[in-house]
Image (tube, grey):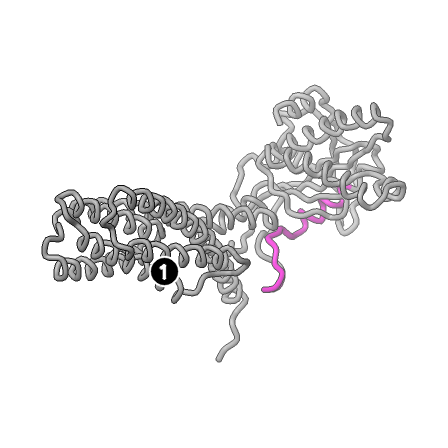
Amino acid sequence: MANPTPVDERDLQAAENSREVLQAEALRGERTTSLMRLGLWAVIFLVGFLTSFIMPTRHIEHAVLYSIYGALSVGYAIYVWRPRESVPLPLLVFMQITDVVVCTLAAIFGAMVSTNHGQPLLTVGQLCFFLAIASVRYSVRSLILTGVLVSISLGVLTLLCIDFPILYVGLLFGPVLGVGFVMAWIQQSAQRQTVALRSRDSLTRFLPKQVADRLLRDGKPLPGMRTQATVMFVDIRSFTAMSETLAPEQVLEFLNAYFANVVHLVFAHGGMVNKFIGDGMMAVWGVPDPLPDHAHRAVEAALAIRASVALYNAERLRKGDPAIAVGIGIHSGEVVAGNLGTPELIEYTVIGDTVNLASRLESVTKSHHVDLVLSGSTFEAVRERFSGRKLGDEQIRGKAQPVEVFTIEDAAKAAAVASQG
């Protein structure tokens, strides 16, 4: 047998993850159903106990039947609520059969003690009441099985109880079964939505939101592609020295609070957070879905980050903490986007010279004593909307020719963009 390809393994893993989610949802639904059955049984038992004083001719069979059914319901509820992954199918079928058998016996006992024209109707009401319990299973297959069992039950009742009001059964059982199917359809629709939401939530914790949405929408890994995009690198200045004065827990708390704000601003401007690199972050505009104004969005996000850091520093200084400084490098150009890694560990990322140059430009902010550096290609795309100045021609490691670098100094625009983000 041929070894599975990486895509096959990912598909198998995705199918297994979906199965586990569905299994967990099914168990939760069965637990809810067990409590509902238990509650309904308690009401019926209480009504039966009270009516025994009004109808002394009622046989002891009812009390025994309800007691046995109640004991089974209690035991089943305890079983399904204990820690487990699922409920065995034979046990589920057994409880369905038990529900219908109890319905049938209750109807037979009711017909046996019926001495007036109202008693058969009451008996049919009890039958439909138990059928409602069976319908609460929220499963179309379970309801089909219940329908077959009930059809057999009605046939038995017709043969054994000549005066059994079959018309009442049809009039009352029909709506009950209809409501059951509606409940099953609603539950299955809700279950599919729950699975989709949980899958999306799980994916977005480990994949960029745009990538997770595409995976859920298309149902297959995103293909590799070459496209025009803008890449941003953001880094905290002198973070190593600052982290040495903090406990590890304080370092993580600081970074989580800082990244929460920066990531929010990237998302607000249509960007994709590709990865965190220590105290740095890489974001991309234009993948996996093309953005015609990717350079504008990236620069607006950078200005929003600049203004946000200024406000953050004002708060830190008020508390007596030192201010922080960030460096932001942005470059626009062609990137290769796609899945990179192994079947066990894979990520959607972008690679190429554009990424490398954006990273280098972030380092250039130090030598020019600015917090934002744009490449010539990025500045050319946004110069009509943002005012800036040329810092010079920078010799970048790995580049044969010097690279024009610019910065944006429009503080008013930065504050306006930050307020919008």
Say whether residue 405 is left or right of residue 210.
right
Q: Is residue 350 magenta?
A: yes
Q: Is residue 415 above or below residue 1?
A: above
Q: Position of residue 141 (x, y in %)?
A: 31, 58
Residue found at the very far bottom of the displayed protein: 1
Q: Is residue 20 magenta?
A: no
Screen quadrant of the C terminus: top right
Extreme-top residue of the structure: 412
Relative to 335, does residue 312 appear above or below in the rendering? Answer: above
Q: Which residues are magenta?
A: 342-362
- The mark tally for this picture is 1
Q: Position of residue 230 (x, y in %)?
A: 63, 41
Residue at screen point 28% across, 60% down = 101
Judging by the rendered image, the residue that carries numbered circle 1 is: 95
Viewer-nearest residue: 31 or 353: 31
In front of the other: 332 or 122: 122
Amino acid type for the residue under numbered disc 1: Met
Q: Position of residue 274 (x, y in %)?
A: 64, 47
Residue 134: give x, y in percent of width and height. 32, 53
In the image, 250 versus 123, the foreground residue is 123
Q: Residue at x 36, y 57 (%)?
A: 69
In the figure, residue 66 lies in which quadrant?
bottom left
Near-viewer residue (409 or 242): 242
Secondary structure, mark 1, is: helix
Would residue 63 appear left or right of 302 to someone viewing this image?
A: left
